[in-house]
Image (cartoon, rainbow, N blue to C red):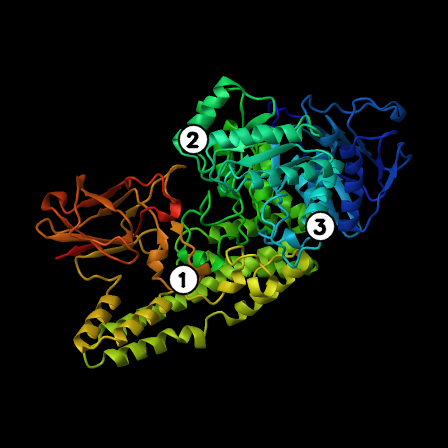
Amino acid sequence: MRVLLGVGALVAALNLSGASIDLRQAVVVVRLGQLPPAESTAAKVLVEEIKKRTGIELAVSKSFPSGRPAIAITSTRTVPEWNRTVPAPPAKAEGFRLHADHSTVWLAGSDARGALYAVGQLLRQLDWDQGKLELTQPLDISTAPQSSIRGHQLGYRSTANSWDAWTVQQFEQYIRELAFFGINAIENIPAEDNRKNPLMKYSRREMNKAMGEICARYGIDYWLWTPAPFDLTDTEKRADLLRRMDQLFDDVPQIGGIFFPGGDPGDNPPDLVLGFLEELATHMRRSHKETKIWLSLQGFSKEKAEAVYSYLDKRVPEWFGGIVHGPSSPSITATRRRLRADVKLRLYPDVTHNKISQYEVPEWDQAYALTLGREAVNPRPYEYAAIHNRYAALSDGFLSYSDGVHDDVNKTVWSALAWDRSRDPRQIVIEYARVFFSPAIGEQAADGILALERNWRGPLPANGGVEATLSYWRQLEAKAPWLDRNWRWQMCLLRATYDTYVRRRLLQDTKLENEANSILARSTPTTAVTSMDEAMRVLNQAVESPAGADLRARIIELCAKLFESIGLQTSVAKYHASGAERGAVLDFIDNPLNNRWWLEDEFAKVRKMTSGDEQARRLHEIAAWENPGPGSFYDDIGNIRKSPHMVRGTGPDADDPLYWWWDNGKSRARLSWQVTMWPQEMRYEGLDPMGRYVVRTTGYGQALLRAGGQRLKPSVDGKELGEFKDFPIPPSAVTDGTLVLTWDKATDEDHLNWRKRSRLSEVWVLKQ
């Protein structure tokens, strides 16, 4: 049957009879003559990918076989030599029709790219195993993409956590696999970050050229991300960048677009940026006359963004492709509203980072942030589906920001939804698991991936699903031992194991810190030193008898396998990761998940005190830090486990916690200072209406507090990390035993880098 769901939407597809066509003896039929690159590559991809999965090598012919099934690939409506009617594909660019009936499977593309995407769809539909190749039929899928730009950034540079170690063949395989789900663009980073990673097998110039050639063979647009991280008035650096771009223009057969970030990196005013792009366009058009340059407004103030909008109001240069919306850009809705209707808008979504990122993980436990860094294996299919669909209609498509394979599931979800945003994320992940793992366990593996996403939601100690997820993946592992060398499978096993390891350590570290605080609370002027010694003996049990030692060994084993299979760099020292935050999870596997490091440093300060009374007083303060006593309250802002009075905002504009990255992830600061945010409000019930209260906070910079709507002045106004601010609360702010706290936006900070802006860490309401 054939059901039309609308222009560009997936047109469904399946026969209820469940009959299958056996394709083990099928012949791949292609047209006579010189085929467009994408169509020619489509046949090659189909034959090679089927052989990898089944061991069956299909024959290729230019005529239909007699007595054997045929898989016919074409990008034209009529093929005279076949003497057959080709099923009509959609009348839209890049669309295709996959039609199977009786002994013929038709892969009819609206154009050459469409033929390639039809192959990807077929691979996602096939039932295969070693020696098995079947397809349920009759089958009729007629579909075309909704977004015109669909791609991912694969920047060959030292910063990446995996593909800087790749061969040209690995790049081609990965680009091919992304095309299974309909991408039509790849973006390289050819001229930024000239560091040489010892894992690199090619020079930057060699790989830049090779990636362009791969894209040309697949009919995929080859984009270039080209920043100017220097003052554009520096004529020497400006000329050097133009020389390098000239070389690249000569090396690359085709360029789909050039993306120039206005900021991140770079800090040039709009007039200099636009003047430079005019000059760059002159160089580019000597050999690439159709290529367009796109500009992002990342890091731009309202005034800077308005200068660009005004420039485009007057004229849109022939070389100008559109605006890119990326991390730290002005609001996408405001941008689309302000732009001329004929100016295109492309998304640059950050699908690669899980903290200090464009799309922070909601309700993430701080224990994960302390151990996983910014680029952990991070499948987030439902979250990213919601994000994609929230903004897709405002844009002409996307090319994602990615720095490795750890976000592979996220790339697939964005690719599939850019084709058809009505799709269910679970069904996308099922197809992902079918094509990359096995149809036999596709649905089960997909549910395992979705469970990994749920592992990251909410307070970790209360999330018993984490242990269940590991048990589930162990059962899958036993069912599919042949996937032991599959890097996507290895990543899932690593995440399931690491999550459970972190949870077990968190439970142990929390228990030990509570015991240590109980010891400190009993300190006297004569026992202060021995109390610290005893507390440290308790805390060090996490080092001497750590929880999850077997899981730790398994993590180390899986990281070694991933380095071998896909070049994933999970350690700076061991696997040459370019930086600790770049997915180097092995380097944080033993980080304490309590305040052990901070307590060690505080004890060193206490030991230097000359008065036993002073020592005991400080130890009592430390012991009661998070437990201020009856009638008082404490919240660790941003920590999902320790902020019961915080009212979290909802919707796309809600603030997310910011998990700070200090001292290469080895900060000894108190954990509560390492996560900050501005809550929508803090609400306290059951206060004594006749009581006197003080609000105490820690953070950095300003804290413009209101209680019951009244702006308060601090009696103590510490501004550095760990220093207190105290705000006496007027009795009128405590109404019927309820206190509501809110904060105004800090003033005069728009010019500051985000790292230097005010932030809030902790809030106490202390009954006097």
Disc 1 versus disc 3: nearer the observer:
1
Query: Which one is earlier in the sequence, the residue at label 1 or at label 3?
Result: 3
Kindly identify the amino acid type of the residue bearing the numbered disc 3. Answer: Gln
Tell me the quarter of the image containing the N terminus. Answer: top right
Disc 3/disc 2 C-alpha distance (Å): 41 Å
Residue placed under numbered mark 3 in the picture:
170
Query: Which one is earlier in the sequence, the residue at label 1 or at label 2?
Result: 2
Q: Residues within 10 Å of mark 2 (few under 14, many from 20)?
A: some
Query: Which secondary structure, mark 1?
Result: loop
Up/down of 85 relative to 139, above or below: above
Residue 683: horizontal and vertical position, in percent?
A: 23, 46
Residue placed under numbered mark 2 in the picture:
304
Query: Which secondary structure, mark 3?
Result: helix
Residue placed under numbered mark 1 in the picture:
667
Q: Residue at x 53, y 39 (%)?
A: 234
Residue 96 left/right relative to 230: right
Disc 1/disc 2 C-alpha distance (Å): 36 Å
Residue 474: horizontal and vertical position, in percent?
A: 58, 61
Q: Residue at x 69, y 21 (%)?
A: 91
Q: Residues within 10 Å of mark 1 (few under 14, many from 20)?
A: some
Q: Answer with the quarter of the image where residue 522 lies.
A: bottom left
Residue 497: horizontal and vertical position, in percent?
A: 54, 61
Query: Which secondary structure, mark 2?
Result: helix
Closest to the observer, 349 or 612: 612
Tell me the quarter of the image containing the C terminus. Answer: bottom left
Up/down of 182 relative to 765, above or below: above
